Image (cartoon, helix red, strand yellow):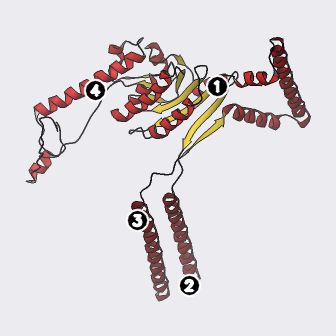
Amino acid sequence: MLSFLSDYGLFVAKTLTIVLALLLLVGGIALIASRNRRSSAPGEISVTSLNERLEDMQHSLESAIMDKESYKALLKEEHKKEKAEAKARRKALKKKGGSEEEGEGENEKRRRVFVLDFDGDIRASEVEPLREEISAVLTLATPEDEVVMRLESAGGLVHTYGLAASQLERFRAQNIPLTVCVDRVAASGGYMMACLADRLLAAPFAVLGSIGVVAQMPNFHKLLKKHDIDYEVLTAGEFKRTLTMFGENTDKGREKFIEELEDTHELFKEFVSSYRPQLDIRKVATGEIWFGKRALEEKLVDEICTSDDYLMKASKDADVFSVRYEEKKSLQERLSDFAVSTGDRLMLRWWDRLYKSRLLSR
């Protein structure tokens, strides 16, 4: 028993030492970061060819299910076909009086599809990387190209989703076709973004709509009053604060709050109507949601199709690229992650040693 208590006391002392050391390390990192306030490390644009990815998947499957001789013959046939197509293009260009260099240039002008992804939370946090991705695409895209956004969002704060929608408007300003694909949900603020599409596609059971505005908050005034606690709200301006969580809400303040909600709803309806005039806005702007096929009937979407099907079809006659903005972690963030992971490993190691010493003392 005494041996166990001694081992346990030693373990606790070592553990506390490690924890304190980690806290000092993290605190030092935070102090350095606060003293040297610099902008976060810039991110970078990552571009992936979906055509190559699909081809790799196809070749992997073919090599797995075909025998070696058949697979080699298939590769030779594909190579032969590519050479024949290139020769036909050069021949056609020569008849027009062009050169091979021009032919290569013509080949490079094949239609391009740029794919963006947006997975929205209540704050539309991904709007920051989205604006970087859009800026990158706009440096290269032309009206002959296309942008496809795979959108997933149940909505959130009005001003943040308003900014996200404004980012998509940049494509329309440059006359670049925008297709939005909704596989699961684009509701409320998510639908505000989706309605900007020149072409809006949805999976059969995707959720769309919810063209409405909601606000809710608890009120603890009665609870505070029960315990003789006064809470005062002082404002300069009649409607600086309409409703409060702790003070006593008035009918006048409540009416004003509802008036503001209604005005926001009207702005929402006007926004949707301006981009999808085919909608019966009075019918669909009730806050209700519709699944994909029903949404098609209400003209909330243009076609029933998953993003996977759409992009596979597009890859047959276009170069399809996935564009993502990836943020780089700062030195402080990397050190902090290293400190936490190191602490976890040390804790597990000390627990393992204690367990083994406990077994040996038996």
360 vs 74: above or below? below
* Alpha carbon distance from label 3 to label 2: 44 Å
Q: Quadrant of residue 211?
A: top left
* Alpha carbon distance from label 3 to label 4: 43 Å
**From this viewpoint, which residue is outermost toward the bottom?**
2
Counting from the top left corner in percent of width and height, residue 298 is at: 43, 14
Q: What's under tag 4, amino acid-wise?
A: Thr
Question: How would you rate the neighbour count of disc 2 (Cα within 10 Å): few for under 14, some for 14-19, many for 20 or more?
Answer: few
Residue drawn at x 48%, y 79% as measured from the top left: 14
Residue at numbered disc 3: 31
Pick whichever of labels 2 and 4 is earlier in the sequence: 4
Pick whichever of labels 3 and 2 is earlier in the sequence: 3
Pick whichever of labels 3 and 1 is earlier in the sequence: 3
Pick whichever of labels 4 and 1 is earlier in the sequence: 1
Residue drawn at x 54%, y 46% as measured from the top left: 43
| Mark 1, secondary structure of its residue | strand
Pick whichever of labels 3 and 4 is earlier in the sequence: 3
Residue drawn at x 56%, y 81% as measured from the top left: 357
| Mark 3, secondary structure of its residue | helix
* Alpha carbon distance from label 3 to label 1: 47 Å
352 vs 156: above or below? below
Instruction: Determine which of the numbered discs, if any, sits on residue 112 in the image.
Output: 1
Counting from the top left corner in percent of width and height, residue 359 is at: 57, 79
Instruction: Determine which of the numbered discs, if any, sits on residue 361 in the image.
Output: 2
